[in-house]
């Protein structure tokens, strides 16, 4: 040891994994690129503008929001994800002020109002989407066919009004009407598999979520493949129900979350007024996350697990 | 026990305490006592120490050897205490106390699982002095009155497993374990080897087992068969040094001397850690090897990542990583809210400080450090 060497003293452990929040966030952005590219290809340049406006507005809102909260803004990538996800679940026809308003609402109300990154109870992108849907319902349901841009209904809309199922192959590839980034299950799957392979997201969430929808629809006499592939289920299952902040901490909790959200999707699609229910299924399960966390605490070494109904407090 | 200017021999007792949970200290070389002073230890604390200037002769003072076959249990136990033997895996609990459990135990587990990554001291000891380890284990089994001796080794050391299997016939059985940090910890080792869980707040003897590190076994053997007290141990010197080595060193040897023996450090030294990378102590001046120093790790710029703490994003990695089944992110929140009662309810005291949670945290939250604060808070609450 060099006597006068400046040695760093810090508490153990002295080794740390190189993974950082920023790396995780930007990897998620990367994983969304196939779906993004697919959306721009199918729905044209306007879709790209919607995406850019949404991301830009999310970043500006976060900067201003953090400034107002007296927190330092860091480019950790979380606002980029929120902006991008919101854009991907908007119809391709929306006027450009809508992504701007929606993503400002998502960041300022959905995230900053709760205290910023890590504090929010609800998925910010879905908060933004729910806000836009409630405020401008007609603008949020103007659908066009891919590549041609002719007004049409979404596969789920057609099904709801008794028009039957859409071809599974078209749904898988994304050759159907719908939100910018939700139509191609294949493109979403590419990114989702990347995140699962890197262990950035837990495979149990999408599996239990999509699996529950498929299973219940099968039991109800519907076409399970259609219901698994149509609408925003894939996008929601791989990229929104796996959001760290707003979903349970434990593996068991994530399965409960997925099954619960799947159940809600089925209930809304089958018995609700709307053809689609992914947004609300995730938002409602977000509200249950603290409760799920409490009841899925792992058993501590050297202690005996008590059944949940025997637990006090 | 010694004055300044006194002549001491290697192995001569120079310090002791009447406390039950303590062990005496012996001169680790022969020479002249030049100073009685407070010295900084690797843990950062200071302790009254005897500074001896070597006469270069290394003259020994040994206790009479004992025949483990004839000596009584009490004689052997007394010898282990007089030899100043403590757990050499890292915790440093006096071995004679551990060998005299207030309850009946049925199994002695010899711990050949290296406590942390980077350390290879126990591995080398098993390969080079396996017989001695087993002789020590036999003596300890006699003291404990147990029939069953299990030698736990992880599967990343196939040579040690093979070697110990050959040697251990008639003494005990080698148990091959999947390599997984922090398995060297008693509680995790017992779960892996015996399928028994030590109750929270309890000790291994509560589930009828005693765990002893391989180095401790060898020290017990030397104390009984040769009459030599614990004055040396094997230390892994690794990291940014020219020649990483396992050295057999006398207790009290300064770290700087160890590094010299390994050809000095390489590149910009950022951190020197006493112990392993997960639970070791970063030192800030030259400190001596103590009985529990298993490793000196030199870290350069490349290994030491200084990153700013960010907010918890609830990714759940720490929950998944915690071998104790705790929810570290939740504990951090509770400690920072100073809610120490809730900390207790969430079993904060079960934390071993193994460091897995802080290792995986993408937000670089110093979780272990915060949990240590929580332990202090709970202790204050109890007063």
Image (spheres, grey):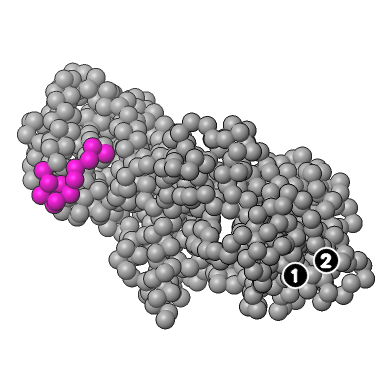
Residue at horizontal 59%, vertical 72%?
B202
Residue at horizontal 82%, vertical 43%?
B163
Q: Position of residue B96 (x, y in %)?
A: 72, 70
Residue at horizontal 37%, vertical 47%?
B364
Q: Residues within 10 Å of mark 2 (few under 14, many from 20)?
A: some
Residue hosting label 1: B82
* Dot 2: element: loop
Magenta span has A66?
Answer: yes
Residue at horizontal 39%, vertical 52%?
B366
Which region of the structure is painted magenta?
A64-76
Chain under numbered label 2: B
Q: Residue furthest front?
A: B5
Q: Position of residue B267 (x, y in %)?
A: 48, 31
* Pointers 1 and 2 in contact (C-beta within 8 Å): yes
Magenta span has B147?
Answer: no
Q: Which is nearer the N-term, disc 1 or disc 2?
A: 2
Q: Position of residue A103 (x, y in %)?
A: 15, 40
Residue hosting label 2: B63
**Residue A79, picture quadrant:** top left
Question: Of A64 and B364, which appears nearest the observer?
Answer: B364
Question: Of A266 and A250, which appears nearest the observer?
Answer: A250
Check chain identity for marks 1 and 2: say if they share one. yes
Question: Of B214 and B230, which appears nearest the observer?
Answer: B230
């Amino acid at each position: 040891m060099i006597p006068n060497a400046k040695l760093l003293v810090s508490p153990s452990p002295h080794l740390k994994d190189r993974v950082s929040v920023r790396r995780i966030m930007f990897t998620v952005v990367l994983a969304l690129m196939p779906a993004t590219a697919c959306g721009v290809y199918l729905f044209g340049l306007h879709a790209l503008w919607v995406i850019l406006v949404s991301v830009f507005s999310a970043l500006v809102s976060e900067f201003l929001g953090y400034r107002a909260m007296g927190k330092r803004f860091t480019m950790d990538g979380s606002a980029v994800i929120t902006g991008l996800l919101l854009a991907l679940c908007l119809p391709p026809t929306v006027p450009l002020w809508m992504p701007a308003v929606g993503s400002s609402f998502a960041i300022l109300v959905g995230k900053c109002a709760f205290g910023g990154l890590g504090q929010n109870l609800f998925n910010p992108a879905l908060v933004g989407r729910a806000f836009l849907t409630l405020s401008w319902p007609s603008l949020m349901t103007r659908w066009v066919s891919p590549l041609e841009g002719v007004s049409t209904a979404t596969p789920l809309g057609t099904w709801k009004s008794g028009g039957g199922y859409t071809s599974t192959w078209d749904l898988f590839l994304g050759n159907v009407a719908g939100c910018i980034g939700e139509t191609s299950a294949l493109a979403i799957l590419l990114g989702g598999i990347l995140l699962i392979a890197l262990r950035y997201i837990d495979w149990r969430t999408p599996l239990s979520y999509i699996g529950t929808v498929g299973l219940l629809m099968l039991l109800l006499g519907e076409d399970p493949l259609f219901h698994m592939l149509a609408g925003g289920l894939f996008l929601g299952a791989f990229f929104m129900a796996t959001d760290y902040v707003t979903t349970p901490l434990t593996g068991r909790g994530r399965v409960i979350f997925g099954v619960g959200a799947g159940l809600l999707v089925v209930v809304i699609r089958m018995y609700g007024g709307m053809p689609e229910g992914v947004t609300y299924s995730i938002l409602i399960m977000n509200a249950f996350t603290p409760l799920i966390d409490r009841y899925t605490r792992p058993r501590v070494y050297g202690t005996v697990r008590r059944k949940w109904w025997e637990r006090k407090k | 026990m010694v004055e300044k200017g006194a002549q001491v021999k290697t192995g001569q007792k120079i310090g002791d305490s009447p406390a039950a949970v303590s062990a005496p200290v012996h001169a680790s070389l022969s020479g002249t006592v030049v100073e009685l002073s407070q010295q900084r230890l690797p843990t950062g604390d200071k302790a009254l120490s005897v500074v001896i200037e070597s006469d270069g002769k290394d003259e020994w003072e040994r206790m009479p050897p004992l025949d483990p076959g004839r000596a009584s249990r009490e004689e052997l136990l007394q010898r282990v205490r007089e030899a100043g033997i403590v757990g050499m895996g890292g915790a440093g609990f006096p071995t004679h106390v551990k060998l005299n459990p207030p309850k009946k135990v049925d199994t002695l587990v010899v711990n050949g699982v290296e406590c942390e990554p980077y350390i290879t001291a126990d591995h080398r000891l098993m390969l080079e002095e396996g017989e001695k380890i087993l002789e020590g284990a036999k003596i300890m089994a006699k003291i404990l009155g147990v029939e069953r001796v299990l030698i736990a080794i992880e599967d990343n050391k196939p040579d040690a497993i093979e070697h110990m299997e050959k040697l251990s016939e008639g003494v005990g059985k080698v148990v091959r374990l999947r390599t997984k940090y922090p398995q060297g910890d008693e509680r995790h080792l017992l779960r892996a080897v015996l399928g028994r869980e030590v109750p929270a707040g309890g000790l291994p003897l509560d589930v009828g087992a005693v765990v002893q590190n391989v180095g401790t076994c060898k020290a017990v053997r030397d104390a009984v068969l040769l009459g030599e007290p614990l004055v040396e141990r094997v230390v892994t010197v690794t990291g940014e040094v020219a020649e990483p080595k396992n050295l057999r060193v006398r207790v009290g040897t300064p770290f700087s001397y160890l590094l010299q023996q390994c050809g000095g450090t390489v590149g910009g030294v950022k951190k020197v850690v006493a112990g392993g990378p997960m639970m070791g102590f970063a030192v800030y001046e030259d400190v001596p090897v103590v009985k529990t120093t298993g490793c000196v790790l030199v870290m350069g710029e490349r290994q030491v990542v200084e990153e700013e703490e960010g907010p918890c994003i609830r990714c759940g990695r720490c929950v998944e990583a915690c071998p104790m089944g705790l929810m570290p992110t939740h504990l951090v929140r509770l400690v920072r809210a100073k809610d120490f009662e809730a900390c207790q309810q969430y079993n904060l005291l079960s934390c071993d400080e193994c460091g897995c949670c802080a290792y995986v945290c993408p937000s670089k939250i110093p979780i272990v450090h915060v949990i240590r604060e929580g332990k202090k808070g709970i202790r204050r609450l109890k007063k």
